[in-house]
Image (spheres, rainbow, N blue to C red):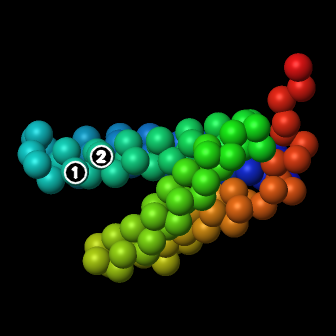
Amino acid sequence: MKRVYLFIGWGIVILGLVHMLATLRFFASLTGAALWFFSGGIAMSLTGALNLLNHRYGLLAPGLRRVCIGTNIVITAFGIVAGMVNKASLGEFAIVLGLCVSATAISMSRRALLSTVVRG
């Protein structure tokens, strides 16, 4: 389970980076809409980074774990709404929600973190 969580965390980071790079393709100039689109990628990458931190330190830092769970829930809900508003394809929904829902479920599992406790 710990490898799956690690894979999901990095998957979210990479998805965020792809989203940021896609800004260059979808917007010809720097506009407010382009900045908002880019900021979505930043939010995704930071969510992935938070999951990677939770993967490593979640049992030692309960506050980190709670913030990670809350962030995953909010990003998942936002992904659902954004996908509906922007009429995302089934493939886009599957990738984004697959990663976000999985991260949410695994971040709630103490068992997924047991084998990642830092040993001094």
Q: Residue at x 69, y 39 (%)?
A: 61
Give the amino acid type for the residue marked by disc 2 in the picture: Ser
Please give the residue where the numbered disc 2 appears in the rendered image.
39
In the rendered view, does 104 fall on the left or right side of 97?
Answer: right
Q: Residue at x 84, y 39 (%)?
A: 116
Q: Where, quadrant-wise, is the C terminus in this rendering?
A: top right
Q: Which residue is nearer to you in this view: 102 or 66?
A: 66
In the rendered view, does 117 fall on the left or right side of 15?
Answer: right
Q: Where is residue 17 shown, x and y percent of the image?
A: 44, 40
Mark 1 Cα-neighbour bin, 10 Å: few <14, some 14–19, many ≥20:
few
In the rendered view, does 42 fall on the left or right side of 63?
Answer: left
Mark 2 Cα-neighbour bin, 10 Å: few <14, some 14–19, many ≥20:
some
Marks 2,1: beta carbons within 8 A: yes
Q: Residue at x 88, y 47 (%)?
A: 114
Q: Residue at x 61, y 44 (%)?
A: 64
| CA–CA distance in space, label 2 to label 1 | 5 Å
Q: Which mark is residue 36?
A: 1
Q: Where is residue 31 shown, x and y percent of the image?
A: 9, 45
Residue projecting furthest to the top: 120
Q: Where, quadrant-wise, is the N terminus in this rendering?
A: bottom right
Q: Which residue is nearer to you in this view: 83 or 91?
A: 83
Give the amino acid type for the residue marked by disc 1 in the picture: Trp
Q: Where is residue 60 shown, x and y percent of the image?
A: 76, 38
Label 1 SS: helix
